[in-house]
Amino acid sequence: MRSVHLNWFTTDEQFKFFIQYGRHEEDMYVHRHADFSELVIVLHGNATHIVNTEESFIKKGDVFVINGTTSHGYKDPHEFRICNIMYKPEMLESAGPEFKRSNGY
């Protein structure tokens, strides 16, 4: 399985987030994030999202978090556009343990 690293996208240590807009015309290989988590917002279209060994249909308006230990990829994209907000998970630790227990995390 391939591992993806945050420094493939940015080397700016001062900026805690990296925001990327993606357009997927073809399947995206299953991969794992080695050193970051990702908040994904589906902006347009739909696809099948592979998470570990499960598959689910995702569409415009869906929002989800992928943590570094989770493998994921996309298949059968149709006009599929996303916004990825990549961040180091330790950055959120300063928000306190309640944050991770809140709905939506």
Image (spheres, helix red, strand yellow):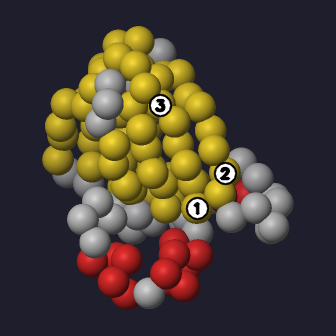
Secondary structure state at the residue bearing disc 1: strand
Let me know if residue 47 appears in the view: no
The label number, if any, that marks residue 31 in the structure image: none
Let me know if residue 93 appears in the view: yes
Q: Residue at x 45, y 51 (%)?
A: 39
Residue 95 pos. (x, y %): 49, 81
The answer for how far apart the CA atoms under marks 2 and 1 are is 7 Å
Q: How busy is the neighbourhood of tag 3: few (under 14 within 10 Å), some, or many (20 plus)? A: many
Relative to 79, residue 6 above or below: below
Relative to 104, residue 48 above or below: above
Secondary structure state at the residue bearing disc 2: strand
The residue wearing badge 2 is 18
Q: Residue at x 49, y 61 (%)?
A: 37
Q: How busy is the neighbourhood of tag 2: few (under 14 within 10 Å), some, or many (20 plus)? A: some
Residue 81 pos. (x, y %): 47, 23
- Disc 3 marks a residue whose amino acid type is Ile
Residue 94 lies in what quarter of the image?
Answer: bottom right
Front residue of this view, candidates 52 and 39: 39
Q: Quadrant of the C terminus?
A: bottom left
Give the mark nearer the N terminus: 2 vs 1.
Answer: 2
Q: How busy is the neighbourhood of tag 1: few (under 14 within 10 Å), some, or many (20 plus)? A: many
The residue wearing badge 3 is 82
The residue wearing badge 1 is 87
Q: Are discs 2 and 1 less than 8 Å apart at CB?
A: yes
Residue 44 lies in what quarter of the image?
Answer: top left
Q: Is residue 85 left or right of residue 99?
A: right
